Image (spheres, grey):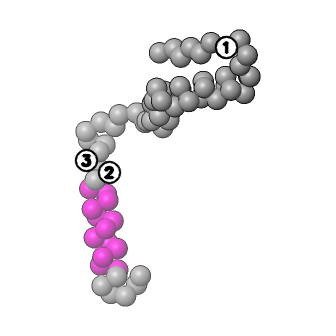
Amino acid sequence: MSIEVKKGKNENTNTLLYRFTKKVQQSGVMKEVKKRRFSGRAVNKNKRKSMALYRVEKQEEIAKQKKYGYR
């Protein structure tokens, strides 16, 4: 996707820059870039499953410690 802004005859550079930034914001390019910037690799099914089991075990351990007054 390309965004093009042409300078008018009596247009100031600051005004041109303002118009350009407005067009970029309205097009949603920056939103897409920010969304893609931090997207990680896909995790396989077994890894997701083991991570979920670990979280459940950890939560149970914390709940047990709270019950006995360790936390």
- Between 30 and 38, the one lying in front of the other is 30
Which residue is the site of mark 2? 51
Magenta stretch secondary structure, dominant: helix
- Magenta region includes residue 57: yes
Q: Which mark, by number, is residue 26?
A: none
Return the x and y of residue 25 as percentages of the image width and height.
51, 31
Q: Are marks 2 and 3 in contact (CB under 8 Å)?
A: yes
Q: Residue at x 34, y 73 (%)?
A: 62
Q: Position of residue 66 (x, y in %)?
A: 34, 82
Spatial separation of the CA atoms under disc 2 and disc 3? 5 Å
Where does label 3 land, which residue? Answer: 49
Picture residue at 67% right of the left edge, 13% below the top: 8
The type of residue carrying mark 3 is: Lys
Q: Answer with left or right where residue 66 lies relative to residue 13.
A: left
Q: Earlier in the sequence, mark 3 or mark 1?
A: 1
Say if residue 50 shows up in the picture. Answer: yes
Q: Magenta segment range?
A: 53-65
At 29% across and 45% down in the image, what residue appears?
48
Q: Residues within 10 Å of mark 2 (few under 14, many from 20)?
A: few
Foreground pick, 20 / 57: 20
Cα separation, mark 3 vs mark 1, equals 59 Å
How crowded pointer 1 is (Cα within 10 Å; few <14, some 14-19, many 20+) is rated as few
Q: Secondary structure at mark 3?
A: helix
Label 1 close to label 2 by CB (< 8 Å): no
Instruction: Pick the residue in front: 6 or 2.
Output: 6
Q: Quadrant of residue 9?
A: top right
Residue at the disc numbered 1? 8
Specify whether residue 64 is painted magenta.
yes
Where 12 sits versus 62, above or below?
A: above
Q: Which residue shows up at 28% across the image and 64% down it?
A: 57
